[in-house]
Amino acid sequence: MHGPDENKRPGTWTSSLRSLLSLVMVAMLIVVSATLVGLDYRRARSAAIENAEANIGGFVSRLVDRLGVLSGDTSALVSLVASVANSFLVPPPERMNDKVAVLREGILRSPHIDGVYVGYPSGAFFQVVDLESVAWRMALDAPRGASLAVRSMERDGSGKPVSRVIFLNAGGKRMLERRVPPSGFDPRTRPWYRVAVDRTLPASTGPYEMAATGNLGMTIAQAHHGNAKIVIGADVMLDTITDFLSKERLTEGSVSFILDAVGRPIIHSDRAMMNRIMAAKDKGDPISPAQNDPMIERIRLHPPPPGRTSFVDVGDRTYLVIVTPLESELLLSGHRAVVAAPLDELMAAANSTLVQGLAVSGAVVVLAVLSALVLAHLITKSLNQLTASANRLQDLDFTTPIDVPSRVTEISMLNSAMNRARDAIFTFALYVPKELVRKGIESGHFTGRVARRQEVTALFTDIYEFTTISERHSPEEVVAMLSEYFDIFSEVVAAHDGTIIQFLGDSVFAMWNAPVADERHAEHACRCALAVEERLRAFNERQKTRGLPEFRTRFGIHTGTAVVGSVGARERLQYTAMGDTVNVASRLEGMNRDYGTTILASGAVVAQCRDVVTFRPLGSAQAKGRATALEIYEVLAAEPVAEQEAGAQTGTAA
């Protein structure tokens, strides 16, 4: 047992909370002066915040206007070419002069456009490029004095691919024509072609780094009205947006950036951060906000309400932040613009006023004020830390130790008690699934020995020939292998909104739709089994390299009604599910041996998720101990989540 004074530090003094509260009387000495100073500060602070909110609102409006101008200008050019320029209905080299004239005029009028091009269903390609870009000049080895480059990819009379580049001067006259080796480029495989083909309205792709120039840009494309298989595209450079964010800052420490729909940074006002974003795009691996910018990570995990200013703490600073969804017609639609200004910089003038007011209040009460502030800080800081620690214990978070040193006896005793409670709960949590307890508390189902009937999806697994594996290896080796094996199940089941009810030997019993409701429980169970199977392939590869046996796992999945709840003795309960549904899932797992399969599901599972999961029917079968036959299916694959969501959105639009 720990004594009440065990956490006291040597050589420190402690006092009771009652003694500290008596010092509140000191504050009475400064009531009048503090009231006056506080009112002045509040007025100055409110004025500074209102001014900052107005400036931020204007900044965001100008940003949206710029995006609107870029989007409207570019889409207008693309739509014009797609609707009235009939010269593009035939592939190059036919009507080359007409094609060049139209696209040259469009590029000259739109300096933010990097290039305009046309892709044909035959694989032919035609492009006009602005050579103001040094990168383009170097990539094409442009001659001195060239203003535009015309790139075409076509086929000659014998069907062989022909690629050439024509250079034009500022007046539009030809300077040089150069044949280049075919690159194998096929416009029909490019995202801008696929997203726009057969569409009557412009569509956008990106943002991404331009292959030739290295600049950040997007593409606006549209199918030609005369032939929906011919697609016109234009690359829009976003440098003006980057420069705008970098130059227009409310204060020295202000930052602004644009996040995509999943919280990844696309454009940032900080040049160094922008370089890291672009470098990550080069590698094909989006930059991780958590490793580079705590502000981005804070906004991603805890987004403030859109369209309203909020106070956000990042590190030791508080920021005034506004998050605005971008609703432009094409460019960056669905992204979010974030502007954050440090509150201390915004409050510089207000803080100066506060200092002057405190000086006027007189030196008589300065000592009392400082003493009261220090003592109040000690109390509130310790209590806030203990409150945060209690909240972490409620969430079953044991990673952060509870260390709240205090000179107050009661707080020191409370810190010791909470540490003992943390140790006890941590030990208990090793034997009870934390996620099960957390979900049960959230759902309100853990209220004693109570069970109810409800629909669930049960999943059972078993390792093939595990008894033989156990005989050939020491218990220590078996436990080590099983621990890593169960870690995979724990991670994947939690990621698919399921709950592991029990580890029994080498078997796993997991359940969906209880204790937390899940409308897609059958689908999530199938996806979980497929994901575990994928993870186990890598696990078994590691096993082979270590000279250890592979774990071949069988799965059984069934959906039906079960009795779900807490059962057991008064002082020892277990949350579980019982009934035919659970038994059938267990039987299906064992039936894999008869069919030579890995994952078997019942017809009840198929009925709920056949539109997103691929099954192979195996006919009817008689489960052991069951009177009626089952329709048996093998689970083969699941539709990717992104495609599933896209299909759902298309169905809604229709």
Image (spheres, helix red, strand yellow):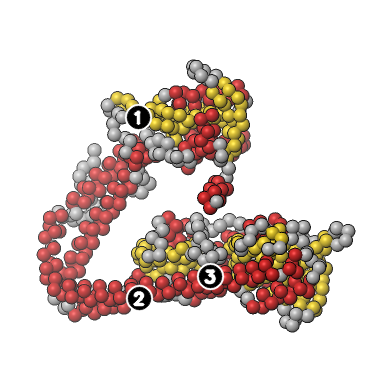
592 relative to 43, above or below: above
Asked whether residue 472 appears in the rendered view, the answer is no
Q: Amino acid at mark 2?
A: Asn
**Amino acid type, residue under disc 1 in the picture:** Arg
Three-letter amino acid code at the position of disc 3: Leu
Horizontal side of 401 relative to 612 (left or right) equals: left
* Residue 54 picture quarter: bottom left
Residue 470 in picture, x, y percent from top left: 53, 24
Please state which of residues 13 and 269 is positioned toward the viewer in this rendering.
269
Comes first in the chain, label 1 or label 3:
3
Mark 3–mark 2 Cα distance, whole angstroms, equals 25 Å
- Point out the tag, 3 or 2, that comes first from the N-terminus: 2
The crowding category of the residue bearing disc 3, from other C-alpha atoms within 10 Å (few below 14, some 14 to 19, many at least 20), is: many
Residue 67, disc? 3
State the SS at label 3.
helix
Secondary element type, mark 1: strand
Mark 1 residue crowding within 10 angstroms, few (<14) / some (14–19) / many (20+): few
Residue 181 placement (x, y as % from top left): 81, 63
Task: Tell which circle, 2 or 1, labels the residue nearer the N-terminal end.
Answer: 2
Badges 2 and 1: C-beta atoms under 8 Å apart?
A: no
Residue 467, above or below 2: above
Q: Residue at x 81, y 67 (%)?
A: 93
The structure residue drawn at horizontal position 49% and vertical position 64%, both measured from the top left corner, is 327
For the point 67% across and 75% down, the residue is 106
Pointer 2: what residue?
Answer: 51
Q: Which residue is mark 1?
A: 452
**158 left or right of 290?**
right
Picture coordinates of residue 610 (x, y %)? 56, 36
Residue 593 occupies which quadrant of the picture? top right
Q: Is residue 350 left or right of residue 607?
A: left
Q: Quadrant of residue 321?
A: bottom left
